[in-house]
Amino acid sequence: MYDLYAEEILDHYKFPRNKGRMDQPDLIYHDTNPFCGDEVTIMLKVENGRVVDVKWDGRGCTISQAAASMLSEAIKGKPLEELRHWGREEMLDLLGIPLGPVRIKCAMLPLKALKAAAWGITAWPHEEEADTSSPRQKP
Amino acid sequence: MYDLYAEEILDHYKFPRNKGRMDQPDLIYHDTNPFCGDEVTIMLKVENGRVVDVKWDGRGCTISQAAASMLSEAIKGKPLEELRHWGREEMLDLLGIPLGPVRIKCAMLPLKALKAAAWGITAWPHEEEADTSSPRQKP
Amino acid sequence: MTTTTRTLDPVRIRDDFPILHRQVHGKRLIYLDNTASTQKPRQVINALVQVYEEVYANVHRGIHYLSEAATERYEGARRKVAQFINARSPREVIFVRNTTEGINLVAYAWGMANLRPGDEVLITEMEHHSNIVPWQIICERTGATLRWVPVTPDGYLDLDALERLLTERTRLFAFTAMSNVVGTINPVQELVARAHAVGALVLVDGAQAVPHLPVDVQAWDCDFLAFSGHKMCGPSGIGILYGKRQLLEEMPPFMGGGEMIREVKMTGSRWNEVPHKFEAGTPAIAEAIALGAAVDYLSQLGMEQVAAHERQLVRYAYERLQDIGGLKILGPGPDDRGGVLAFVMESAHPHDIAAILDAEGIAIRAGHHCAQPLHDRYGLVASARASFYIYNTEDEVDALALALHRVNQVFG
Amino acid sequence: MTTTTRTLDPVRIRDDFPILHRQVHGKRLIYLDNTASTQKPRQVINALVQVYEEVYANVHRGIHYLSEAATERYEGARRKVAQFINARSPREVIFVRNTTEGINLVAYAWGMANLRPGDEVLITEMEHHSNIVPWQIICERTGATLRWVPVTPDGYLDLDALERLLTERTRLFAFTAMSNVVGTINPVQELVARAHAVGALVLVDGAQAVPHLPVDVQAWDCDFLAFSGHKMCGPSGIGILYGKRQLLEEMPPFMGGGEMIREVKMTGSRWNEVPHKFEAGTPAIAEAIALGAAVDYLSQLGMEQVAAHERQLVRYAYERLQDIGGLKILGPGPDDRGGVLAFVMESAHPHDIAAILDAEGIAIRAGHHCAQPLHDRYGLVASARASFYIYNTEDEVDALALALHRVNQVFG
Ligand SMILES: Cc1ncc(COP(=O)(O)O)c(C=O)c1O
Ligand SMILES: Cc1ncc(COP(=O)(O)O)c(C=O)c1O
């Protein structure tokens, strides 16, 4: 479990990349996890179906905030269509550590915000999750 | 447990004493145990506060019917005032065997009918029982 | 007994059940009260011990090792149960205390929200009180009408009457897949289809079916299924309500409290996902995990094999009991029933039968078996009932028959 | 530690708890999540095993040896619990799954029958969701109004506000005897008297009080008390609702089914005696019996001694945690609280605190602890919480303090 606070994650937490606000984003989504109060807003600039700029803002625990920072680096240049299909696996690959049933929700928060933005939606549709212990996000 | 079918109990069951109807009883009470369908009616003739004659009628298992028969013999000549205070102990003394939580209710049925008759009541008052697993009789 | 490889070997199975090796009143225990509750194999007892000795903590939301481990096992048990009854998703499996609570959950949560005066709830005369009283209570509260499918003299549902009783006013049809008295196995799939044809939902009481028969909720297509862990080698204190996901999503919650919420504000609350929406407070953690072990145990035996073993035993018992003077078996012939035999004797009251058998170490039930309307229908107040499970043998049936002869001697 | 004869010896007590000897992440386990659920002594685990290996059967109405033996032990456990909280009679003790079900039982059975528009239910801002959500649900159904007693900045109930809030419209006042977050021990007896003075009934949430303090329902004079077995060395899946006999007699039943009835007819049913009227279906048999063993265990230690041990430990911890930079303890000072310490740190989110501690083998909780309104009131979303029980030591508090320093290092 100490891996949770591996160099890289702490580095992203302490020195977040792409954190801040964006004027006139093409897509924006704000999501929260009411169980721990974590918040993430994702803002995207999009050209020809690709992400050309990312900003994010938020507050919360190391995992949710580091995940947002890492995600913001990873998606630049990626086609929206691809991001729409990212899931738990992609997010865990980025973080590079295993997570228990509670912390996985922290990690998924920025991805959920990103996917909502990428789909251009404002409320989450009915979505299946593998882990029956995790609450679905219906902001 | 084989004691349940001790000579004496079976004898009372097969050859019940004082079973039958009485014309014009001074006191009469009919009680049932809905869990097993046992039924007992107690009929008393009373003079100077004493039981001078007893009849009973009923149907059911060995224990409830033998108990009624034994009881009918035991109470002849007894003052009503005394019978009003008979309880579980007196009944078990008559039967002479220990009983589990279900069969105790069979044994108590005739006594309950007797006590109701002795008190001259038609519905059971609020009554405490030691055994929380036994239903109170509210006929 | 036939000896194809997958036939149950009750003698070997008995080794797994510590209690079956004890004596009662100086006689070896012959446990034939399985419809009321079954005994537990050491695999299930060990699962309980292991949880408490190694991974116990409260589940959900804990960020420490034990809580995560307990949560994984608790949710793992849910997946096992889902697979056992072939649910589409573990989210369709709600942990409750017992069959009774499962049915009450539907009565309160679905019933209070959906039943109106003029609506009808249909049950049958062969139901257990647990599938009667909740509907009496909810119908009284909502003004809906309770209707009853009659039972034929030989213990079947009267399907002609059903034809008349199932109408577009029927909002829910609740019936048992197998009677806990007469043993009748009802044609669930057909009954569900007929109810759905008039637009009614279906709740199946699986308390007797799930422990004894292969059950596939997708094949049955029932909307709800309730059953109890303690009747299928699991611990006491745990039961299951299966419900179709869509219905569960639409239903308001039943009990309120921790875990079933997503957010609690002073101005109001929002609910958690299914199944958690219906699991308020700390659940029966160790019990759910041990039920998972029971499901593993039964799956390994194979439910087809379990059913075949009981069918064989009940046929044998049916024959042996025919020989006993004045004994009358209630319900269908030996081919259409599960491993339960209720009977009455001319010579003795059911209480006396049970007491005489107890003295011989044989445990059966006597009473109305929580099915008073069925007994009323047969003009009885009580019956005696012997019921079988995976560990029972033909030897034990022989002992039962012998003891019943003895009853006739004592009271003859 | 002082060493009068009746002081608890946590070191010896630890020997009774198998799980406390395990390691977590290669470190010895330090279990400080006792408010969520406590660990179990082998006396309780053995009681479970013994039931299943020696005397298991369904309770009530069975006329065979095992059923009678199980019934006696089940009812014996009820008597033990009644004595533990000094109830007038075992009939006032209803077995439920947990505190949550106990409160829901009162909300549904008493609330639905007695609450009308214009009536008020009074709760407090420091309640657990289990003592909030049932009242939100029932008030919405009945049209009654839910009112809240505010909490002061230092974690006490605002008794001046209570004066205004308790009126002749108040039908029920429901509050916790001890907060599961800020640890405040409320003046139950005084609160009950004030509520009774305006004619309101009182439900006490005893989930934290009963495991940790001597409780006497007759001295408190509360009308209902709910608590959970799993928080007091008992198994999961069992809880208790105490209720005054007269009230229980008058209340309609909650769930319907087997055992809670006296008679079931097609035209309607009549109810069994209390407490059975409220125990529908097969109860948590082994769990109730094992809870009886937990009550024996705690009684032998002595609840005064349990409380004294925790008071000492929480005072010590309160001091040690003061030293940690940027750490703020929520709630009252060290003298007015039970053995629970919730805190926040400037350097780290509660999740991160819990995760760092977990890596050191230390189990604490992080989150809103099912008390969102209380956290809202303090402008927090989450806190970290360490909580103590009979087996915790000052050594473990030292380890906690050390690990919290480490949190500051990691995030400094
Ligand atoms: C004060 C309080 N009330 C109620 C509860 C709910 O207990 P359970 O989850 O056992 O129903 C808890 C347990 O977290 C508690 O601490
Ligand atoms: C057909 C049927 N339904 C319901 C029940 C009730 O089960 P439980 O007491 O576990 O709730 C039983 C058990 O006796 C049963 O046989």
Image (tube, coloured by chain):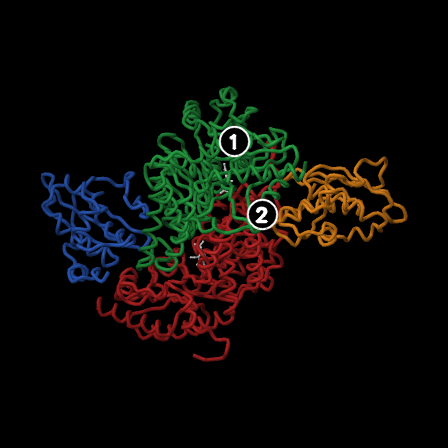
Chain colours: A orange, B blue, C red, D green
Tag 2: amino acid: His
Q: Label 1 lies in what chain?
A: D
| Left or right of D410 on screen, residue C256 | left
Tag 1: amino acid: Tyr
- Residue with the mark numbered 1: D318
| Foreground: disc 2 or disc 1 | 1
| Left or right of C59 on screen, residue D309 | left
| Left or right of D383 on screen, residue C331 | left
Q: Camera-side residue: A26 or A94?
A: A94
Q: Quadrant of ligand 2?
A: bottom left
Q: Camera-side residue: C157 or D352?
A: D352
Q: Camera-side residue: D409 or B87?
A: D409
> What whole-number distance in Å separates the C-alpha atoms at marks 2 and 1?
35 Å
**Is any atom of residue A32 visible in this view?**
yes
* Residue D364 sits above or below residue D343 on the image: below
- Residue with the mark numbered 2: C276
Q: Is mark 2 on a helix, strand or loop?
A: helix
Q: Where is residue D308 in the image (x, y as percent from the top left)?
A: 41, 33
Discs 2 and 1 carry the same chain letter = no
Q: Is mark 1 on a helix, strand or loop?
A: helix
Q: In which quarter of the image is residue D67?
A: bottom left
